[in-house]
């Protein structure tokens, strides 16, 4: 196993689930409850020192028990390593702790995840839709059960359906 | 009341002062101002709701999404090859770099190594695109701040390079010249000639822009010390590119995680000190010169050879064979319509575009389509820092600040 993964495992034996290294990318899966602690640890620990927020993303796995996956990718400018931290979130309790207190950039990136996938972030200062309109009621577009052409909201716009 | 009387009205400032008890009270309240969505200085359709105290910004809330086209969702429905033209429309002023970043991500997923010539061609064109991007930025930023002349000069030179793109791939903006595993076509002699002439032509022009701006007191007053962000905060926000390097962090993926032909070329990464708008401008000026250096070295070191990796299950067959050979035509058709079988897994691949780190996070479960494709666009992430950076500055500085990120809304909203 990768030394960084071992370090995190020994620090969080309960929360650590698995580590995977593929094509040079290190991905570490943790339990949802431990996600915030793990992130705070890799930010603060002088050997890991992940001070740079790369992106926050989410993946929908509709056939699996814990449907959503939140992905945080961080980088260390001084140590030059990239770590991807992932946690699964079930659909009936679609919540995870926000990282806005660790990386300020998480604010917008988490809002985008909420907007697109419907995952809520606890303690987020301003959790609103960001790319879709505020009054958008069709759900969350990047979920796999959302059709590409939308759910019919657009058909109610007169100016799009005007035959002239 | 006569006009003269109105002018001399004296308002009460301190309500408890006995001498001013009879004077009228001055009305003070916070003002809410909408900037955009249609505003010439917002580089697209961006709306910012500004809470003002006098002329000072107390809080600014960017309202994004006017250009949201659901590119990430569209990617899930198409094959990997089909997505290349979509990337042109992300950052539509610098399409080549988007193609480059996307193709690199897919190559990482498929584990393809490119022939040397293809790498040099890619690097050269990417650096030409970087010059175009910075020229566009410099012209519009100066225009927004009030120095109009520079705009005409930078767009004159940008035009030369866009015509060069036109000759290279038939399009000026939506280029789609990069392919997974290589590039679409090789340079001809005329193109090489024109680049060589441009290398001679351009350095005096850079000095020209510098003379226009660095002796311009308005430009200096409006950029020096405006929108200062410390290195630590910039990293925490995930800023990248010249916006981060202006704060003194030398984070440049071309050096940190060398790719393509960059490890074979010598160049420097300019780094600022103060983290203000001026430093971010200075870095871009210096990057003109560094880009020219890279282009020159690519031209010198480039050897004849194949321009496409030889992995027939993934890469497209040469165009001349597609038109004359049935099997190649079928192969081309199948690669585009069904796609190639990608291994299951997930990768993130970041590329140093001229705005910052443009990354693609691809999750594959096998098959011809990406299961999930996430675009890490620098413009979107930079807008996240806007409220923080604009606090306490004047309304007019708002334009300077998001101008200094070099935002393009097509990329920001995706």
Image: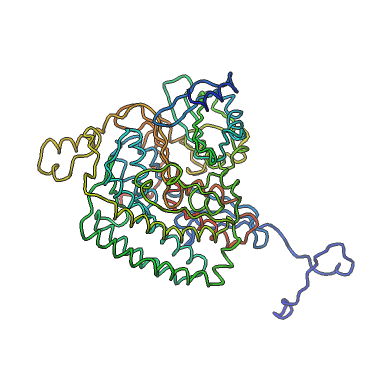
Q: Which colour scheme is used?
A: rainbow
In the image, residue A60 sits, relative to residue A152, either above or below, namely: above
Q: In which quarter of the image is residue B75?
A: top left
To which quarter of the image does residue B358 belong?
top left
Residue A123 vertical position relative to residue B139 in the rendered view, above or below = above
Q: Is residue B195 left or right of residue A140?
A: left
Q: Quadrant of the C terminus of chain B?
A: top left
The image position of residue A62, as x and y in percent, is 42, 24
Of the 4 image quadrants, the one containing the N terminus of chain B is bottom right
Q: Is residue B2 left or right of residue B236?
A: right
* Residue B258 locus on image (x, y percent): 41, 43
A16 or B384, nearer to the observer:
A16
Q: Which residue is drawn at 43% across and 68% down?
A: B151
Q: In this view, does B46 lie to the left or right of A157?
A: right
State which quadrant residue B164 falls in: bottom left
Q: Nearer the viewer, residue A90 or B279?
A: B279
């Amino acid at each position: 196993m990768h030394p960084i993964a071992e370090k995190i495992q020994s620090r969080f034996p309960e929360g650590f689930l698995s580590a995977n290294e593929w094509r040079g990318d290190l991905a570490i899966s943790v339990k949802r409850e431990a996600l915030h602690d793990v992130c705070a640890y890799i930010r603060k620990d002088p050997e890991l020192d992940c001070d740079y927020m790369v992106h926050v993303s989410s993946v929908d796995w509709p056939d699996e028990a814990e449907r959503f996956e939140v992905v945080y990718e961080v980088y260390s400018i001084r140590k030059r390593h990239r770590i991807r931290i992932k946690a699964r979130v079930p659909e009936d309790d679609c919540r995870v702790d926000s990282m806005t207190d660790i990386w300020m950039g998480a604010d917008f990136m988490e809002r985008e995840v909420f907007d697109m996938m419907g995952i809520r972030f606890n303690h987020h200062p301003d959790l609103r839709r960001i790319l879709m309109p505020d009054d958008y009621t069709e759900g969350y577009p990047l979920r796999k059960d959302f059709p590409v052409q939308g759910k019919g909201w657009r058909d109610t716009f007169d100016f799009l359906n005007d035959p002239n | 009341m006569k006009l003269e009387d109105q002018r001399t009205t004296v308002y009460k400032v301190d309500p408890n002062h006995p001498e001013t008890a009879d004077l009228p009270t001055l009305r003070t309240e916070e003002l809410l101002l909408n900037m955009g969505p249609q505003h010439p200085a917002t580089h697209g359709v961006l709306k910012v709701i500004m809470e003002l105290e006098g002329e000072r910004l107390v809080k600014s809330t960017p309202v994004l999404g006017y250009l949201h086209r659901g590119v990430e969702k569209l990617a899930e429905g198409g094959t990997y090859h089909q997505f290349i033209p979509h990337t042109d429309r992300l950052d539509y002023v610098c399409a080549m770099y988007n193609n480059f970043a996307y193709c690199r991500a897919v190559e990482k997923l498929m584990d393809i190594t490119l022939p040397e010539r293809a790498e040099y061609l890619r690097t050269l064109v990417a650096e030409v695109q970087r010059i175009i991007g910075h020229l566009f930025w410099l012209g519009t930023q100066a225009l927004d701040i009030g120095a109009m002349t520079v705009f005409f000069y930078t767009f004159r030179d940008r035009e030369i390079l866009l015509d060069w793109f036109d000759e290279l791939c038939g399009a000026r903006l939506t280029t789609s010249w990069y392919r997974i595993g290589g590039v679409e076509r090789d340079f001809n002699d005329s193109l090489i000639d024109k680049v060589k002439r441009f290398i001679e032509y351009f350095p005096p022009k850079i000095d020209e822009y510098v003379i226009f701006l660095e002796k311009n007191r308005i430009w200096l007053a409006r950029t020096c010390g405006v929108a200062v962000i410390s290195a630590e905060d910039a990293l925490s926000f995930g800023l990248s590119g010249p916006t981060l390097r202006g704060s003194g962090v030398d984070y440049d993926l071309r050096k940190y995680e060398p790719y393509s032909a960059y490890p074979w070329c010598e160049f420097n990464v300019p780094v600022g000190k103060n983290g203000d708008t001026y430093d971010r401008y200075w870095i871009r000026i210096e990057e003109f010169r560094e880009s020219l250096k890279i282009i020159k070295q690519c031209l010198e070191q480039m050897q004849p050879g194949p321009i496409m990796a030889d992995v027939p299950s993934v890469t497209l067959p040469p165009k001349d064979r597609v038109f004359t050979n049935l099997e190649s035509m079928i192969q081309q058709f199948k690669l585009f319509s069904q796609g190639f079988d990608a291994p299951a897994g997930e990768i993130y691949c970041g590329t140093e575009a001229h705005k910052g780190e443009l990354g693609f996070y691809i999750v594959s479960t096998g098959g011809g389509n990406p299961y999930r494709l996430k675009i890490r666009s620098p413009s979107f992430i930079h807008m996240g820092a806007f409220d923080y950076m604009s606090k306490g500055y004047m309304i007019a500085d708002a334009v300077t600040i998001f101008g200094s990120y070099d935002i393009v809304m097509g990329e920001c909203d995706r």
